[in-house]
C-alpha cells in the first residue's frame, strides 16, 4: 500500500521536484530500467563518468547538500575527507537505508517507488569518491524495497551501469543489498558499520571517522537514502539550480521530503522547498487536523526531536531555524500530537522506545533510560514521588550531549526535556499527594 | 518489554544435536562472498536457518560459527542483539505490532489489547495451537498508515481492533 505522495501539488517536474517527479509523472512506481531511462534515468551518471571525481565532489559541496538522515552534515564536505588517488586502496560507499526513526517513512517510499534512482545515485556517488564496492544497508522489514532494489541491480548490471569498466570508463563498482535484522541503533553510522561487519551494532569511538577507517578498517562514506537520491539531479542541473530550489524560504538548498503522521486530515509525503513552514505543511497540504481533534504539540522530525508548539508553526523547517527554536528538524516528517492525548503517556511511550532500543554499551544510556521509563510510568499513573520531576530534569542533563557514547540517549532526552518545559503542570499533577512512610 | 530474546528464554534445546542441511550450508557460503570477511554473513546465516526452522536453536549457533570461522559466543551475541532473530521457538506466524509514536497515537493500545484477548496470550507468548506468536516491534516506517503490524514478512496497514480478524484469517 503506497503512501500519499505530493497530494494537491501541481506542476511536479524535474526542475522543481528532483526526488519525486518521476513517480508523480508516471503515476506509479518506476521499477523498469527502460521506463526509468525514458525519464532522464542514468543521464546524470553518463555525464558523471566524463568528469573528474573531485569535480563532482566540488559540485556537491557547492550545492550545499546537507545530510537528509537528520544530522544535516554537508555531504560534499564529508566526501572531501575521503582519501583520493591511486594509492587510496579499497574504499566503500554505504547507503544508510535503515530507516527506523519513529514517525519517518520517506526512504521506504523513495526506494520502493524509485529503485533505479537509488542505484544511479549509488553508482554516481561511488564514482565521485572512488569506491569500488557499495552496500545498501536496508532494514530487514522493508521487504518490497529489497525485492525492487535487487531487481533493479540485476537490470543495471545487464545494462552495463554496474560491474567492471562501466560505460568504458575503467571504473568498477559492485553493489549489494545488505539486510539488517532490526535495531534502531543501526542508524548510527558507526553502529551500522559494525552491523555490516556481522557484529553487535554498538557504536564505535570517533575518531577515527568512517571516512578514514570505516568498514573493515577501510575508508567508508555513509549517506542516507534521500541525501544520495539528490545527487544525480545536482550533477545534471548544477549547484546553482539546486540552491535555488528552496525559493528563498531558507539558506539551505534543495527540496526536502516532508511528511505528516498522527491525526491530520491527510497523512503522507510531500516534496517541498526546504524551509517550508509546518503551518503550510499541516494546514495547506495536510488539510489540518482531523475533525474533532486540535493540535496539542508536534515533533518536527522523529522521536528524537524536541516537541514544538503552536507558536512554532510559522518557522521555516530547515536545519538551522528549527535548531534555534530549541529542537531539531531531524527527518522533517512531523508527528502531530492531538489534544485528546495525555502528554505523559506520549512521553512514556517515547522513552520506552529508546530504553528498549539502547544497545547497552554505555552506562548512562543503558541504566538511565529504563529509570526514565519507571519515573514516567509512576507520574503517568499519578503515583510520582516528590523529587521525581527534579530527577527527570537531572536525567536530561546526565543523558545529554557529551555524556554518553553516541547520540541515542541525548535523542531520547529531547522529547522529555521539551515536555517538561511546555507541560510542567501535567507533570506536577502526576505527583502523588500521599507521602511514603520511611 | 518482553522480547523473543529475553534471557530466561535462551537454551530450550541444550544438548540437542543440530546439523546444517547441505542447502543451508551452501546458502551461507554464498552469502559470505559478498563481504571482505565471512563474519559479515552472520545475520544472513541466522536468517537462513530461521527460514527453515522458524527460530535459531542452540546447535545452529555453533554450526554457523563453524562455517564462518568465528566463535559461537560472537554468533550468539549477534543472534540476541537483533529484534528479528528468534532464539526460542515461535509459532507458524509471528505478529509484530508497532508500538512506536505514530501507531501509539492512532490506537496501538486498543489493537494490542484486542490481539491479546483474541489470541489468549501475552506479548512474547505463542498460542497453544502453535499458530501465532505475539511480539512488539519498533517503528515499521509506515506511520501515515498507522496502526501498522507485520505478520511474518508482510506489512499490514491501518489495522485496528475492529478489522484485525480480516488480517488474522489470512494466516492459518
Image: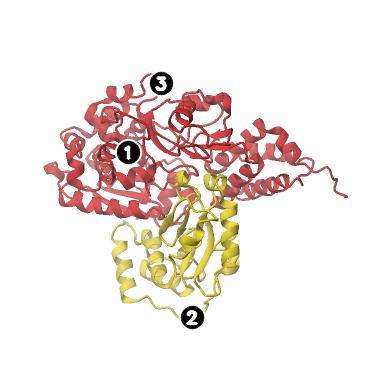
Q: Chain of mark 2?
A: B
| Residue B61 higher or lower than A306, as above or below | below
- Where residue B157 sits in the image (x, y, percent)? 45, 52
Residue drawn at point x = 34 percent, y = 28 percent: A254
| Residue that mark 2 sits on | B16
Circle 3 residue:
A249
Q: What whole-number distance in Å separates the C-alpha atoms at marks 3 and 1?
A: 22 Å
SS assignment at label 3: loop
Q: In 3D space, how far apart are the residues under numbered discs 3 and 2 (Cα atoms)?
A: 65 Å
Residue A28 in sight from this viewpoint: yes
For label 1, the residue is A228
Chain A, chosen colour in render = red
- Please tell me which residue is depicted at 64% across the width and 36% down the height of the picture: A397
Say if A307 sits above or below A367 in the image. above
Closer to us: mark 2 or mark 1?
1
Q: Disc 1: which chain? A: A
Amino acid at each position: 500500500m503506497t503512501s500519499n505522495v505530493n497530494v494537491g501539488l501541481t506542476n511536479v517536474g524535474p526542475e522543481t521536484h528532483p526526488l519525486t517527479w518521476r513517480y508523480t509523472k508516471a503515476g506509479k512506481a518506476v521499477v523498469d530500467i527502460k521506463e526509468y531511462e525514458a525519464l532522464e534515468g542514468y543521464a546524470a551518471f553518463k555525464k558523471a563518468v566524463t568528469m573528474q571525481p573531485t569535480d563532482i565532489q566540488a559540485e556537491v559541496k557547492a550545492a550545499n547538500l546537507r545530510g537528509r538522515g537528520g544530522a544535516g552534515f554537508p555531504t560534499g564536505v564529508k566526501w572531501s575527507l575521503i582519501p583520493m588517488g591511486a594509492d587510496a586502496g579499497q574504499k566503500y560507499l554505504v547507503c544508510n537505508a535503515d530507516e527506523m526513526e519513529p514517525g519517518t517513512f520517506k526512504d521506504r517510499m523513495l526506494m520502493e517507488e524509485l529503485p533505479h534512482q537509488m542505484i544511479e545515485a549509488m553508482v554516481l556517488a561511488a564514482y565521485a569518491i572512488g569506491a569500488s564496492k557499495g552496500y545498501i544497508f536496508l532494514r530487514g522489514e522493508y521487504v518490497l524495497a529489497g525485492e525492487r532494489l535487487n531487481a533493479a541491480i540485476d537490470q543495471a548490471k545487464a545494462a552495463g551501469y554496474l560491474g567492471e569498466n562501466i560505460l568504458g570508463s575503467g571504473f568498477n563498482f559492485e553493489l549489494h543489498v545488505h539486510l539488517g535484522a532490526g535495531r534502531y541503533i543501526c542508524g548510527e553510522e558507526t553502529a551500522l558499520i559494525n552491523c555490516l561487519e556481522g557484529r553487535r551494532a554498538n557504536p564505535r569511538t570517533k575518531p577515527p571517522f568512517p571516512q578514514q577507517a570505516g568498514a573493515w578498517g577501510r575508508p567508508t562514506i555513509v549517506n542516507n537514502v534521500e541525501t544520495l537520491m539528490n545527487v544525480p539531479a545536482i550533477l545534471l542541473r548544477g549547484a546553482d539550480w539546486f540552491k535555488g530550489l528552496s525559493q528563498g524560504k531558507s539558506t539551505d538548498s534543495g527540496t526536502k521530503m516532508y511528511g505528516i503522521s498522527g491525526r491530520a486530515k491527510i497523512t503522507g509525503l510531500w516534496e517541498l522547498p526546504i524551509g517550508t513552514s509546518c503551518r503550510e505543511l499541516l494546514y495547506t497540504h495536510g488539510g489540518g487536523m482531523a475533525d474533532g481533534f486540535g493540535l496539542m504539540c508536534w515533533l518536527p522530525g522523529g522521536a528524537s526531536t524536541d516537541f514544538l508548539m503552536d507558536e512554532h508553526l510559522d518557522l521555516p523547517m530547515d536545519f538551522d531555524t528549527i535548531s534555534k527554536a530549541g529542537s531539531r528538524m531531524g527527518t522533517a516528517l512531523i508527528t502531530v500530537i492531538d489534544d485528546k492525548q495525555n502528554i505523559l503517556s506520549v512521553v512514556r511511550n517515547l522513552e520506552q522506545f529508546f530504553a528498549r532500543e539502547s544497545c547497552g554499551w554505555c552506562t548512562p544510556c543503558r541504566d538511565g533510560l529504563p529509570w526514565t521509563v519507571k519515573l514516567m510510568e509512576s507520574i503517568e499513573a499519578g503515583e510520582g514521588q516528590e523529587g521525581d520531576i527534579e530527577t527527570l530534569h537531572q536525567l536530561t542533563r546526565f543523558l545529554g550531549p557529551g555524556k554518553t557514547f553516541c547520540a541515542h540517549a541525548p535523542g531520547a532526552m529531547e522529547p522529555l526535556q521539551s515536555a517538561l518545559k511546555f507541560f510542567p503542570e501535567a507533570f506536577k499533577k502526576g505527583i502523588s499527594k500521599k507521602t511514603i512512610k520511611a | 518489554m518482553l522480547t523473543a530474546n529475553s534471557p530466561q528464554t535462551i537454551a530450550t534445546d541444550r544438548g540437542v544435536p543440530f546439523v546444517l542441511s547441505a542447502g543451508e550450508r551452501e546458502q551461507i557460503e554464498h552469502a559470505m562472498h559478498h563481504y571482505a570477511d565471512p563474519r559479515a554473513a552472520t545475520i544472513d546465516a541466522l536468517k537462513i536457518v530461521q527460514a527453515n526452522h522458524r527460530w535459531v536453536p542452540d546447535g545452529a549457533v555453533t554450526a554457523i560459527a563453524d562455517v564462518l570461522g568465528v566463535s559461537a559466543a560472537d554468533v550468539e551475541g549477534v543472534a540476541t542483539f537483533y529484534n528479528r532473530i528468534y532464539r526460542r521457538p515461535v509459532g507458524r506466524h509471528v505478529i509484530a505490532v508497532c508500538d512506536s509514536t505514530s501507531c501509539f497515537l492512532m490506537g496501538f493500545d486498543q489493537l494490542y489489547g484486542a490481539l491479546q484477548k483474541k489470541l489468549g496470550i501475552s506479548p512474547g507468548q505463542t498460542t497453544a495451537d502453535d499458530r501465532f506468536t505475539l511480539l512488539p516491534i519498533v517503528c515499521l516506517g509506515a506511520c501515515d498508515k498507522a496502526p501498522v503490524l507485520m505478520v511474518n514478512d508482510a506489512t499490514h496497514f491501518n489495522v485496528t481492533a475492529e478489522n484485525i480478524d480480516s488480517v488474522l484469517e489470512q494466516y492459518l
